[in-house]
Image (tube, rainbow, N blue to C red):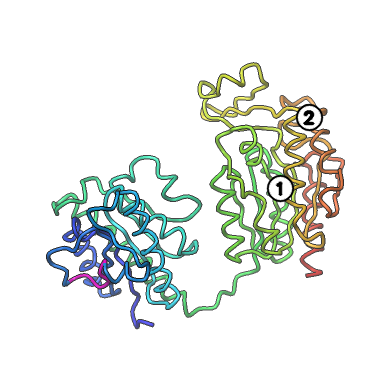
């Protein structure tokens, strides 16, 4: 293990060597970090003295090469695999404390995927990219990759690019210093609980959070907006939590119906596979999320809508959709340990607008979902609370169910 933090600098040295060398030298000149340069280019650069891991060293374990006969997409796939293997080895050896990539769309694609796959949330990872001013969701995914727009193309040094790269180099160096310092300190924080929240389940989550904190737990709240659910599932896999209070499963509705806040098909799976206690409810499953009203697909015309704000349009789930959502939850939880799983159902509405007299109150639709979860297919205990999800009695019941499992564990 290095006596100083080490940052891996990643890029295509056949076309970006000057910029990548500038990043490496700036990091080293800080006096706080060392840096190693990893080449993921298609060709050997004419001057490779600054490269610490050459493309040949990178590719050797994969038994593949990249040359004129390689298509661009196959070359990127080979390089992504090679970079992932090399970074995994360096991380396992504690040889690096941060990573930075710099370049255009190809470099960003390779770096972002490798960074997502190798490093846990919390490990410093930064990408300077010509693509970082647009939609970066497919690069960042559910992780905490920091994206920095290069402003000028990463192609030959100039005053604009130099100022951006200098900031990036000092940023990753600062993060790496902190990462290195945290290595030798054992965390003394309280055991953590993950909770999912939406604007229309906020009162419930606030009450549950207060009760859990009174019990000595640290609470991490995830906004159930697609990315939030994916991040929570990943962090569960990374062993960050002792339990999950999955109050707000609304992302399942977006996945089923075609809303914009889906968390993908793996939502509501990690806790069961990780074997940690989970309490699951039906928060905001009365709605599907879209953007502005003008963006709602024509196929949904005539449905019941609520304009949450200028940017968000909510659509009420139907009876059939609710029944299907109940089946989906039952299927996902059927593989979970009954001793570590509880379902808690609010009988008087699933959100702040699914209340008596509210715009989304539809008892028939709600009953269809509740009946699907009462079917016995789940295998774990199902608790029913004669309250709306935002009533204090429901929050208390959910916390009590989780605490009982945690105590028995």
Q: Please report contact status of discs 1 and 2: CB closer than 8 Å, yes or no.
A: no
Whether residue 221 is situated above or below residue 316 in the rendered picture: below
SS assignment at label 1: loop
Query: Which numbered marker is on residue 247?
Result: 1
Q: Decide: few, some or many residues near mark 1? Use Cα within 10 Å; few <14, some 14-19, many ≥20.
A: many
Which is more toward the observer, 32 or 13? 13
Q: Residue at x 33, y 63 (%)?
A: 64
Q: How many marks?
A: 2
Query: Which numbered marker is on residue 97?
Result: none
The rendered magenta stretch, by its main secondary structure, is classed as loop
SS assignment at label 2: helix
Q: Residue furthest top?
A: 302
Q: Which residue is mark 2?
A: 365
Q: Residue at x 73, y 57 (%)?
A: 278
Q: What segment is highlighted magenta in the picture?
A: 50-55
Corner quadrant of residue 354 = top right
- Where is residue 407 drawn, in percent x and y? 79, 68
Q: Quadrant of the C terminus?
A: bottom right
Corner quadrant of residue 314 = top right
Earlier in the chain: of badge 1 and badge 2, it is 1
Which is more toward the observer, 252 or 30? 252
Q: CA distance from mark 1 to mark 2?
A: 19 Å
């Amino acid at each position: 293990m290095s006596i100083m933090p080490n940052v891996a600098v990643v890029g295509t040295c056949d076309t970006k060597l000057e910029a990548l060398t500038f990043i490496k030298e700036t990091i080293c000149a800080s006096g706080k970090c060392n840096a190693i340069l990893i080449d993921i280019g298609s060709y050997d650069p004419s001057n490779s003295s600054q490269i610490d891991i050459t493309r040949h060293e990178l590719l050797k374990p994969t038994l593949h090469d990249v040359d004129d006969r390689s298509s661009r997409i196959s070359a990127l796939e080979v390089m992504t695999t090679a970079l992932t293997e090399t970074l995994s080895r360096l991380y396992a050896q504690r040889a690096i404390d941060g990573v930075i990539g710099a370049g255009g769309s190809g470099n960003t694609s390779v770096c972002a995927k490798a960074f997502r796959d190798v490093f846990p949330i919390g490990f410093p990872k930064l990408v300077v990219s010509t693509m970082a001013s647009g939609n970066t969701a497919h690069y960042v995914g559910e992780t905490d990759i920091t994206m920095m727009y290069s402003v000028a193309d990463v192609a030959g040094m100039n005053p604009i690019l130099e100022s951006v790269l200098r900031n990036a180099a000092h940023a990753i160096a600062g993060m790496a210093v902190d990462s290195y310092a945290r290595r030798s300190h054992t965390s003394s924080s309280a055991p953590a609980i993950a909770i999912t929240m939406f604007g229309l389940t906020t009162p419930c989550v606030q009450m549950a959070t207060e009760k859990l904190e009174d019990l000595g737990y640290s609470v991490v709240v995830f906004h159930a907006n697609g990315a939030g659910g994916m991040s929570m599932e990943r962090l569960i896999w990374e062993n960050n939590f002792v339990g999950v209070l999955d109050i707000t499963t609304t992302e399942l509705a977006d996945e089923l119906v075609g809303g914009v806040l889906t968390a993908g098909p793996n939502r509501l799976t990690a806790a069961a596979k990780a074997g940690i206690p989970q309490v699951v409810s039906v928060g905001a499953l009365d709605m599907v999320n879209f953007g502005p009203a003008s963006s709602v697909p024509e196929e949904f015309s005539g449905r019941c809508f609520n304009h949450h704000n200028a940017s968000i349009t909510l659509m009420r789930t139907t009876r059939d959709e609710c029944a299907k959502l109940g089946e989906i939850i039952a299927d996902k939880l059927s593989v979970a340990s009954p001793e570590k799983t509880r379902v808690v159902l609010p009988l008087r509405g699933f959100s702040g607008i699914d209340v008596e007299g509210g715009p989304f109150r539809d008892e028939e639709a709600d009953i269809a979902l509740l009946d699907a979860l009462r079917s016995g297919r789940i295998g774990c205990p199902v608790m029913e609370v004669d309250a709306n999800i935002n009533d204090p009695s429901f929050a208390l019941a959910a916390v009590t169910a989780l605490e009982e499992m945690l105590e028995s564990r």
